[in-house]
Image (cartoon, rainbow, N blue to C red):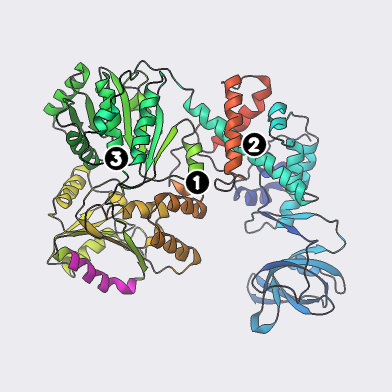
Amino acid sequence: MSFNPDMDIKYVKLVGEKRAKLFNRLDVYTAGQLLRLFPRTYIDFSASVSIAGAKIGEYCCVKAVVDRTPTGVMIRKGMTIFKTAVTDGESVMELVIFNNKYLAESLEQGREYYFYGKVTAPMGRLQMDSPVVEKADAPAGLRPVYPLTAGLTSRGVANVMKNALELYKNNESEDIIPEQIRHEYNLCSSRYAYINIHFPSCRADMLAARKRLIFEELLCLQLGMSRLRGAKEKTGFVISRDVKSEFMSSLPFLPTAAQVRAVSDCISDMMSGERMNRLLQGDVGSGKTAVAAAVMYCAVKNGMQCAMMAPTEILARQHLESLLKFFEGTGITAELLTSSTPAKEKRRIKASLAAGETDIAVGTHALIQDDVEFSRLGLVITDEQHRFGVGQRSALSEKGSSPHVLVMSATPIPRTLAMIVYGDLDISVLDELPPGRQKVDTYCVDSTYHQRLYAFIKKHLDRGLQAYIVCPLVAEGEETPLTSAEEYYEKLSENEFSSYSVGLLHGKMKPKMKDEVMERFVKNEIQLLICTTVVEVGVDVPNAAVMLIENAERFGLSQLHQLRGRVGRGKEKSTCVLITDAKGEQTKKRAEIMCSTNDGFVIADEDLKLRGPGDFFGSRQHGLPTLRIADMLEDTEMLRKAKQAAEKILSDDPQLSDRKNEGLKREIRRLFDSVGSI
C-alpha cells in the first residue's frame, strides 16, 4: 500500500474502525493528520537517576528491577489498581498502575526496566503512579510521548505511527519546500523531519526535525494569509500636500511621540502612490482617535472623503463628537449615519455623501448598506475592527476605488500574532499614554467580600461618581452557579442599592434600548450599571471610578483589561475588583498579572501564553488555523524567517502556479480548510 495523506486513518495498520474513533477525538482523521500528531514531549531513558536521587513532585526516569509480581485490587466496577515494588539495589519504590492489566502483567519479577513518571511520597514512602515503562535492554534514544485520549496509550500511538511512517518512507513525492529555500534556511528534508520528530535517535536529530516542521507550518501560514489578502494595490488617492503639522499644532494638548510617529507613518503611506493598509494598535486611552483625526484632516485637505466605522452607535456618536471638536473652525464637515438615524435625515446625509458635500461619514454597519454612495472615498477607518467580520470590513472599502485603509484596535495583540493575523498590514503602535491617564488599582478577592465592596461603591456614588458591575451571563439558568446580570440587577436594585439609580445593560437587549441605557449612564442619570461585556468596547464615561467583575475566572486576560479600561478615564482615582472563588493555579496566576500591571501589551502576551492563539480572539473570524507544532511566542525568530521566505516565494510566483510550489499550495489549502478560509 502506498502512502496517501488523505487516506482514512482506519486503513493504517493497527487502527481499524474502533481505534479510528479514538484518534478522531484528537482531530486525527487521515494518515497525513496522523503524521502531524507530534509528540508533546520525549523521555530520555538514558538520563536515569537512582531511586534515592528522585525528587518528590517531579518527573524522572529510574532504572530498577521488579521486586515482586504486580497484584491487582478492584476498587470499584471498571477500576482495578495494580501495585508492585521496584529496587535499584539500594532503595525501594512502589509502583501504582491504574486499570492497565496488560502493562501490569508484562512486568516480570527480577527483570530490569526503565520507569518514567512523577514521584510522590504518600505516608513517607516513595511512589510512582502510572509509569511509562521500557525494557532496560531496549535500543537507546528518545521515546515520544503523545497527546492522548481515553482508550489510547502513548505506546499504542507510537506503534501505529511506526506503521504510518513505513508507508511514508516509501513515498516518492517531492519535498513541498523548494530546494533553494531549504538550502538558504538550513532545513532538513521532510522525510528526515517526519521520521526524526517521532523517533529520533538523539536530541540533535529531533531539534533538526522540529526546526524544519515549525518553519514549514509558519511558511504555509504566512503564504495562506498573504493569498487571502492579495498584493499591494496602487491607488489614485495620493496626498500631495502634507498638512499634518498644521493639524497637530492646533490640538489643545501636546501629542505623545508615539502619536506623532503613527501620524507620520500613515501620511508617508498615503504619499507613496500605493494603498495604505495599516493597523493602529494602542492600549485603552492611548489617543487613537486623535491620530485618526490627524490622518482624516490630511486626507480631506487633499480632496478625499473619509468613512469611519465603529461597532456600536454610542461609540460612533462619541467619535463624531470628538472629531467635531478637533475640526472646529477648519471647514471640515462630518455626519453620523446609524440604523437609528431618522429616515428623512438618512436621505439627506446619503445625498450629501454621494454629491461629495460631506467630507467625513461616521457610523456603524449602516455605512455599508447598498444605497450608501461616496463621491471620492479615499480613506476608510474601522475602529475595534476585530468586532467586524472580514466581509463587513471589505464592504466599506468597496465603496471607493482602492481607498486607503486604517484599522484601529484597543485590544493589544502580541507582536507575533499581529504579524500573522495582520500579515499584510503595516503596524503602528501607540506604546505610551498621554499625561494624566490614571493607573487603575486592581484587586482580586472572593465572594465573601461582597458587602464590603457594596459599601465601597456606595461611598463613590454618594460623592457623585459612578460604577459598573460586570457579570459573565445575561440571564439565570444559562449556566450555574455563575451570577447573571438580570438576577444581580433585581437583587441589588431592590435591596442594597434601592436608594440609588441602577441600570441593566446586556447584549440581548434591542440596540435602541442599549443605546438609551448607555446614554443615561453617560449623563449620570444611572449611577450603578449592572452589565455584561457589552461595555467592553470604547464607551467613555470619565465619571465612572469603580468596576467589580463577577466570576472573573470566566474572562480572558485581554478581555479583563478591556473591561478595566472603562474606568480610570477621568480625574478621580479608579479601582477595579476581580471577584472569583476559583482556587486553581491558573486563576491565581491570572489575578497576579492583572493586579501587577496596567500594560495591555504585557497582558496580551501573558494571555496568549495561557490561552493559545486559537482562543485569543474568542472566534475564528480571522481565519487563523490551529498550529500543530509552531509556538507563537517561542518561535518569533522562525516566524520572521518564514515571513521573509514567503515574500520571496510570492514575489517570484504570486499565484503559486509553478510546479515546484504545487506541494506548498496543497499544504496551504489543507492548513486553512479547518477554518474555511481558502
Q: Where is residue 314 in the image (x, y as percent from the top left)?
A: 21, 42
Q: Main secondary structure of the magenta part?
A: helix
Q: Cβ–Cβ below 8 Å for labels 2 and 3? A: no
Q: Residues within 10 Å of mark 3 (few under 14, many from 20)?
A: some
Distance (Cα) linking label 1 and label 3: 36 Å
Task: Please give the range of residues in magenta.
Answer: 447-460
Residue 408 drawn above or below residue 238: below
Residue 570 drawn above or below residue 452: above
Q: Foreground mark, 1 or 3?
A: 3
Can you see residue 365? no
Q: Position of residue 305 (x, y in %)?
A: 26, 22
Does the magenta portion include 47?
no
Q: What element carries label 2?
A: helix
Tell which circle, 1 or 2, labels the residue nearer the N-terminal end.
2
Q: What residue did someone put label 3 on?
A: 255
**Quadrant including the N terminus:** top right
Q: Foreground mark, 2 or 3?
A: 3
